[in-house]
Structures are given as C-alpha cells and as structure tokens.
Amino acid sequence: MVWLIDNFITVVDGVAFGLLLFTIAIGLSLILGVLDVLNLAHGALYLVGAYVAVQLLGGRTASMWAYLLALIVAVVIGLGAGTGLAVMMRPLARRGHLDQALASLGVALVAADLLSAVFGNEVHTVPAPGFLAGKFTFLGYTYPAYRIAVILLGLTLAVVVYLVVERTRIGALARATVVDGPMVRAMGVDTRPFVAGLFAFGTVLACVGGVMGAPILGAYPGLDQYVLILGLVVVVVGGVDSVLGTLFGALVIGQVEVLGVSLLPKFASFLVFATMTGALLLRPRISRLQAVAA
Amino acid sequence: MRPALEVDALTGGYGNSFTLNQVSFQVAPGARHAVIGPNGAGKSTLFHLIAGTLPQRGGRVLLSGDDVSGRPEPVRVRSGLAMTTQQPRLFRTLTVAENVAMSAQRAHGTGMRMIRAVGHDRAVQRAALDQVAAVGLYDRRDDLTSTLSHGERRQLDLAMALATNPRVLLLDEPTAGVSAASTAQFIELVGTLTGLTLVIVEHDLDLVFGLATQVTVLHQGTVLADGPPRLVRARAEVQQAYLGDGVNESLFY
Amino acid sequence: MTAGPRPQGGGAFGARHAAEPPPLDRGAFGATGVSGTLGGDTPALEQTNPAQSPGKAVAPSPRWVRRVGPLMVAVAVAAVPFGFVPTITSALTRMAAFAVLVVSLDLLTGVAGMPSLGQAAPWGVGGYAAALVALHVSPLAPVQLVVAAAAGGALAAAIGWLAVRLRGLNFLMITLALAELVHALANQWSSLTGGSNGLVGLPFIRVLPAGPPLVATGYVLWYALAVAIVCIAIMVAISRSAFGRTLRGIRDNEDRMRALGYSTFWPKYVVFCIAGVMAGAAGSLWVAQAQFVSPGSLEFEISALALMAVVIGGRGTLYGPALGAALVVLVRYELSPYLSGRGRLLLGAVFVLVVYLLPRGLAGLRPAPRRVRS
C-alpha cells in the first residue's frame, strides 16, 4: 500500500498511457477482428496525428482552439486514410491476409518516410494546450493536468466505442462478423460502406490518438513502429473479441510499460513482450485461429 | 480374433453438445461395415471421433485392440487408420500424382529426408502411380486438382488414403454427389481392396445392403441396431427411425 | 465438369494451366483447407506462369542456362573488386549477407508457410556471437561463422519449441514479440553486448589460421560470397528434397498433412531451426564486413525488410528472394544518400507496387519453365 502511495503519480501516468494505448489498439483490434486485416500502417497513422499536433501546437504555448482544430484535422485525415486503405485492401482480399498486411506495411513505410521528409529527423515536442499545460494538486500530490485530461478523454472515447460496438446495430454486425464472418456475409452484409466505415473508425482513432499523445510522446521518426508494436501487444493480450478486453489489455500494458520504465528500467521492454508471449501461448485467439498441438 | 476397429461407449460432439452418446460396436478384420442412420444421427461425428479430429469426451477407440483414445490424429493414421471425407481436402497447387506422392512419401518414411532431390525417389513415385492407377485416375495423373470433377476429386482422396497403407479405412459417404457410373466403379474398387477393413457411412441403402457384411444403425447419437444386413433391415425400430411411425410399407425389400 | 478445353499437362513441353487463385477464406490467416496457401498461390517447386494459356508449348529456358546462370552471376560479382571502388564491393558484401537471411526467411515463410517477422533475432544473435568471438577468442572468420550459426540455431531451437505450435497470425505475432524481447535484451545486457552502443573495434577477419587479416574489401567479398553461395545452395537442396515437399504440403494444407499421418510439429520445428542457423551465419557475414554490431541489428525494421525482400523476389522460389535482398539493400541503404535519404520511401513504393502488380514477385516474371515433376 505504501508502495502504491509512493508511486501514485507513476501509476496515474500508467493509466493515462494505458488509455492512450487503448485509443490506438481498439482501432487495430476492430480492423483485425472484424475485417481480418492486420493494419501495419496503424502506427504511421498515429504519427500523422502527432505531426498534425506538431504543426498546429508546436513551439510556443498552444491554445485550446488549436488543440480542437488539431483533433478535427486528425478526424478528417483519419476518415480519408481509412477509406483509402479500405479501397486498397479490397483487390487483395482474395489473395489472403498476409498480402493485405504487407500492403499496409508498404504504405506505412511510405507514409513514415514522407513525414520524415517534411518534418525532419529530430524529435519534436509538443506542449499541452491552454490551461492543461499546468499542474494541479489533489490530495497533496501534483500531477500534470494534461495526463488527467488524457485519462478523461480516453475514458470518454472508451465509453463511446463500447456503446457503438456493443449497443448499436452496426456494432452488432461487427461483433457478429468476428464470431462468424461467413454467416454475416451470407446475410448480404460486408458491403463496401461497412468495410470502409469500419476502417475509417479505426484509423480516426489512431490519428486522434496521435494528437492526444503528442504532448506525452512527442513526434519523431520511429515512433510509428514503437506505437504499432505496443498496439499489437495490446491486441494480443486483450484479444479481438471485446472492447472491454482491449481496454483491459491496454491498461495492463500501459501500466507495465510506465511502471517498468520507472522502477525496473532494465526490464521494462522485457516485461511487455514477455506478457505478449505469455498471452499468445496461453490464449492464442487472434483472428479466430486456435493453436494446434504437436 | 481381435476386431480391427472397436469403439466402446464413445461419447463426444461439437462444442458442449454430445452428438454421440455411449456408442459401442466392433468391426471385424476384413469386414465391409456400414454405418447408416437418418440425418443428424451422428455418423460424421463418429468418424471424426475415431480419426481423432474431434476430442472424445468419454469412451475408447481401439485399433486392433490397441487403445488410441487421446492420441492425436497423425499417430492414429500411422497406426493404420485412414479416412476419406465428403469434401476432399487436396493440395490445389499439385497434380494428381503429386498429391498421392505426398501421401506415399510419408508411408515410405522419407518425409523428413533432406538430401536427394524429390524427383530421384523412384519408389515413392512408383507407389503413388500405382495408387493413382488403382482408383482409375491414371490418365489424369499430371493434371492439377482444379481441373478435376467432384467424383474425380473423391477418387484422388481415396488414392491418397490408400497410399498411407491403412489397415482400417473410413469412407464418409463415398458415393455422395457421384454419378452412377462412378458408383459402379467404386463398388468394383472395393472388391479389390481385400486386405483392408472398411467402415462406410452411406445414405445409399441399396449400396449398403449389397455390399456390407455388417451394419450399424445410428439414431440420435446412439446405436439403434447392429448386426448382419438381413437382420438389421427387418427390425421395426430401424424402419421407424427412417420413416417415422405409422408407415406400413417396407423400407427395404 | 470443367468448362472449355481440358488443360492437359505432362510431356516435355506442356505448359500447365496454373491452379486458380484460392477463394476468399476469411476465417484464418494463411488459411488451410480449401484455399490452403498463405497469401495467394505460392508456387510449388517451379510452377508455370499463370499468364500462359493452357496447352501452349513454351520452350523452357535451356538447362545449361539454369545451371550456368547463377554461376555466371557469382563470377561477375566476384570480379567486381577488380574494376570498382571499395564502397561498391562492400555493398555487394552486405547484399550477400542479407541474401542469406532473406533466403532463410523464404524457406520458413515461402516454402513452409510460416510467416515470420522475427528473423532479425537469430541474425542479430549470430552477429553478436561473431563479434564476441572476434573480440575475445579468434579473428578467424570460419570460427565466428560456426559460432554464429550455432547461436542462431540455439535461439531458434529455444524459441521454436513453443512458437511453431502456433499458426498463421498467431505465429507471426509471437515471432515479433520474441524478436523484440531479444532486441530489448541486447539493449539491456550492456556487460555482454555493450548496451545501446554495441560492440565496436572488431579486428579484420582472417580466413586461414596463419593467414593475413583481410583488410581489402575484395577479399571480404569473396569470403562472404563463398559462404553465401554454400548456405543458399544448402537451402535450395533442402527445398527440393522430400522434406521440402513435406513443408509445402504443410503450407498448403496442414490439416490434410495430419490426416495423412504427418506430424506437423517436427518438420516445422526443424525448418525453424535451420532458418535460425542460416540467419545466424548471415549475421556473422554482416558483422565481418561492418566490424561492428549494435541493437540496431535486432530491430523490427530488419525483419520487415527481410519479409519485403521475400515478397519482392517471389515467395517460395528462394532465388527470387536472394535477388530481392540485393534490391532491398540497394534501395534502402546504398542508394539512400543519393535520394536525399529517401531510400525507405522508394522501397515502400516499389514494395506496394510489387504486392499489387506482381503477386509472384520478380520470379513471376520469368517465362514458364517446364513443370518439374515432384
């Protein structure tokens, strides 16, 4: 208990990071679980959002309006990117999932390099917007206000996604596709708008996540890979079956990563990937594949 | 003499259901043992449980007295059990002969050999071509499987199963969706498989009662009747299971 | 029940109509069952070009070309140091090293159907092993090579025991996770690996116990080329053997293989270990020319580049990916300075084009060779 109090701020940081990871991972998870596409461009989309934040918020202290604008721009870019990706994936659908994943990998490479070309190779930091740039005190502890904002924003997003997936007809369709894709298709669904819409939903979340995360993680070449890999870890640990599962996975991994870096820096990455490996061996249920014993 | 195949209180099914419940019967060596029953009786489930592709929830499966329950499918196949399915699973990028060679190669024990190019293994090639000819596909031996008709695919499936040198062969509705000429061919082929024990799931009752030495009737996951064809088809319960109550005319003449 | 003329194969010159592409199978990544192939119809051994119409006789490239061709390429490459600057020579060395890695990945992914984003792990471990041997034990390259190959193989043996029990996307993920684990390990275990700085100051390699250090890049190229040729030849031989056929069977229809009595675990485990051994050997070649190793060798990007090279070259063909490796190294590393550092952009664009336009990679451009009987 004492430990928790001593490290409370780090734990809160972990929650914030976890919710940020959720924003990224849920898009990956939906696209993978429903459409069977491993979107390796997801990290690059996050990075795009981060650079949008750099462009609109970077340098001096930024205003809340600039932040809101950044979020809106991220949504627009996300919609466009999602639709574009859905269109790209369609001709490859009959060739299998590796080809789709590879195409997204190529897109990621191109996008990441374009971003490097435009923004350079140095690390960009982004200030938190407006009043969120400060700290505030609560129960004798001071935390950066932005972390709290991320937690609140992340929770809101989680609730929204949960409601959409679990409580709407579109969501029901998505869930049904995860459970029994061929049946849903036999019902006449899987039309282009549904696919494009789902893709866009995921990519918007990635881009928005990039804006949200910019004041925490900054923007630099290679961040896309870092975010993608962590996102994949969360998808593996949390599974593709449910929003709550992804949320749980994201919070766990977020906590492991942040606490790990702070308390056991030598073992932080180790713990994250060990968790991923453990999840794969104990409960390998991504994309409806079961492990096969020897 | 020990039965070639025996199932003892075999229980299992898909998911949590028990499609098959306490099924027991024995198959004599060299028998042509038919398993019949109305749809949903559990015939395919039975085969999958015997082959090991479905986990058993109870009971035993014995091959020549050896309890193979719980052993994975490849082990059972190596113990002499082979199966053909209604939807043949073939290697689509390979020719007919190559498909059978894939099977023959394992039976010859050369599946893990890394030296010597595959074209040099004459024994495996010969064995494969022998089986291809035995099922009547010799002039299709170099054609890709995508060019085969459904009946031909089933013939290929059979050739692959035979190439494993089985002692017990499970045939899941071998004449379903196949022409009358091919059915006749199949009957002829069965006649040549004298060393083998056959267990056949069939809906074609004429075929069953013409061919079988023993018949087991399944109904709703349990054994309804088990014995020589003459006796089985006279039993009222069997006729009832197929036709329902209150029908006077005989199902089998 | 086939419509139209029945395509007949066989005979000396029959060009066979290739199998139609597998139907969409949504349930699995690298599906088994009806579609059976990972990412499209990967050619078994040498398959016909689908663009050829059935029954049309196509003169295959003469046998002597197929035998002598690679030899001529090797000789041409070996002659480069006589006419070109050292930077080109060392670039070719890098290509040779990377080619061995890529071919090992193709054996694993293209032939055996096990998609991996983790081959950087045995490559990097092999590189570190070679470097440690160079620093503390011996500057003899063959010693470094053997130790590196053994290290790569040992890593694969340890990882593979559990990893190959997974299929498709799950397997892809675990290879990624484990490679990242090894990457993290290299960064953290500074006492052994030098941490994020890596190991520097490796001596020039020697090939003979009493021989001189190979200072000239030309000699290093010849050494690397010789090793690369041997490694790739071994992998080609394996692919053409009965074991190779078993692997392709597992790739195309693992469930049916089990129904034929094959244990699918052992072939997959063995090929995983072989790929690890070869990747480790490749890593030692890279370190021999770089005289330096760092955690950068274990990055995800290396695994991704290797996979891209496999796809660009032509999955399952082995020789295609070897060329793909050269292309990837060329565009990503060697040409990058001339493209204002935009090597990755060009590579990504080329890669996307290949995925869409050349499903069989560069190897698919070859005119249809005679179908080799398995």
Image: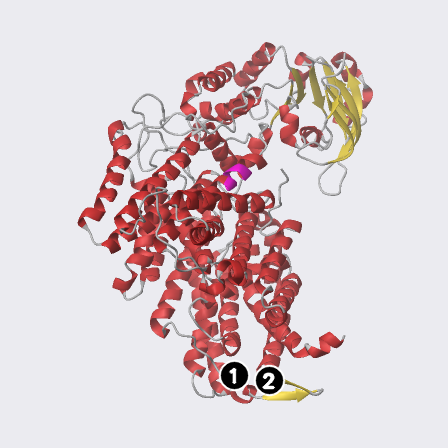
- The residue at which mark 2 appears reads as A145
Q: Is residue C271 magenta?
A: yes
Q: Residue placed at 32% from the left, 58% from the top?
A: C333
Mark closer to the chain start, 2 or 1: 1
- The answer to which image quadrant residue A153 occupies is bottom right
Please give left or right for residue C356 compared with residue A1 in the image: left
Position of C71 relative to B242 (above/below)? below
Instruction: Determine the CA span between mark 2 and mark 1.
Output: 9 Å
From the viewer's side, name the closer residue of C211 and C263: C211
- Residue C47 lies, with reference to residue A235, above or below; the image says above
Q: Amino acid at mark 1?
A: Ala
Q: x, y (%) of residue B242?
A: 74, 26
Identify the subunit bearing mark 2.
A
Above or below — where is C115 with respect to B79? below
Quarter of the figure that contains the N terminus of chain C: top left
Asked if residue C40 can be seen in this view, the reply is no
Which label is found at residue B223? Answer: none
Quarter of the picture holding the C terminus of chain C: top left
Tag 2: residue type?
A: Ala
Mark 1 — residue? A128
**Residue situated furthest left in the rendering:** C83
Helix, strand or loop for disc 1: loop
Identify the residue at the far front of this view: C210
Residue B100 image point, x, y percent:
50, 23
Q: Is residue C182 visible in the rendered structure shown here? A: yes
C211 on left or right of B128: left
Q: Is residue B240 magenta?
A: no
- Secondary structure that dominates the magenta span: helix
Q: How dense is the environment of label 1, judged by Cα within 10 Å: few (below 14), some, or many (20 and up)?
A: many
For the record, the magenta segment spans C269-273
Do the residues bearing badges 2 and 1 touch, measured as CB atoms within 8 Å? yes
Query: Is C290 in front, or is A238?
Result: C290
